[in-house]
């Protein structure tokens, strides 16, 4: 689990996936939270949940490097989803992050907070040398978040699923050279 001042990022277990795929109210009950409307607002994220569940079932070691559920602490509400796109690769210790929040919880700095928490988690593992992210190829809220957490634009590339995207990155040395701006606990 990753905890920031306002968020708890909970690794999505197979039990969480099963509850979510059966009835999202069951997931809320399991987490002891309420569901924010459109907490899973990104259509691609909702569509990916069945295959994400199957992947975790086949690769249980991916827990912690896969899907996270974002709970707003003060409101006790499930407000978003994100996480990593798998464990660090063998080619340079690279992981990729992503995040999505319910529309009513955007523009509050929560994406920045969640992304910083994921960076802290990733770089707490010595084998991780670089964290990356991808965005649509336009200046938007997500590119602003990535700049705020110290990531730099690397290149435009063609993704098989998403078409043209911008790739962003931060190396361990860059991350360690900047002091953390929030307290994050990893457990």
Image (spheres, rainbow, N blue to C red):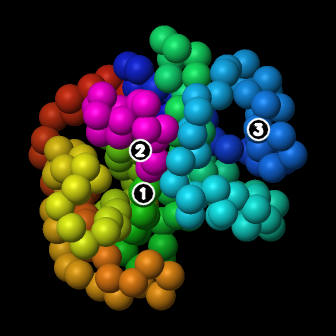
Position of 172 relative to 149 (above/below): below
Residue bounds of the magenta highlight = 99-112
Q: Are marks 1 and 2 in contact (CB under 8 Å)?
A: yes
- Viewer-nearest residue: 28 or 16: 28
Q: Report how far apart the C-alphas of labels 1 and 2 lie in the structure.
A: 7 Å
Residue under the image location 51 percent in, 54 percent down: 42
Residue 97: which disc?
1
Q: Quadrant of the C terminus?
A: top right
Q: Report how far apart the C-alphas of labels 3 and 2 lie in the structure.
A: 24 Å
Q: Read off the residue under disc 2.
A: 118
Q: Report how far apart the C-alphas of labels 1 and 3 lie in the structure.
A: 24 Å
- Viewer-nearest residue: 82 or 137: 137
- Viewer-nearest residue: 4 or 165: 165
- Viewer-nearest residue: 43 or 143: 43
Residue 124, magenta (yes or no): no
Residue under the image location 40 percent in, 68 percent down: 93
């Amino acid at each position: 689990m990753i905890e920031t001042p306002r968020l708890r990022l909970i690794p999505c277990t197979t039990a969480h996936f099963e509850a979510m795929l059966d009835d999202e109210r069951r997931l809320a009950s399991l987490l002891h939270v309420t569901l924010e409307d459109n907490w899973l607002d990104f259509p691609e994220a909702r569509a990916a949940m069945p295959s994400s569940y199957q992947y975790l079932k086949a690769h249980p070691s991916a827990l912690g490097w896969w899907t996270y559920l974002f709970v707003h602490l003060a409101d006790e509400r499930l407000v978003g989803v994100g996480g990593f796109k798998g464990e660090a690769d063998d080619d340079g210790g690279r992981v990729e992050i992503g995040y999505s929040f319910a529309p009513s919880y955007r523009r509050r700095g929560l994406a920045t907070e969640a992304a910083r928490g994921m960076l802290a988690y990733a770089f707490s593992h010595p084998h991780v040398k670089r964290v990356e992210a991808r965005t649509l190829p336009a200046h938007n809220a997500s590119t602003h978040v990535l700049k705020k957490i110290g990531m730099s634009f690397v290149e435009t590339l063609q993704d098989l699923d998403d078409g043209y995207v911008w790739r962003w990155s931060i190396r361990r040395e860059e991350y360690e050279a900047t002091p953390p701006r929030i307290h994050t606990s990893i457990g």
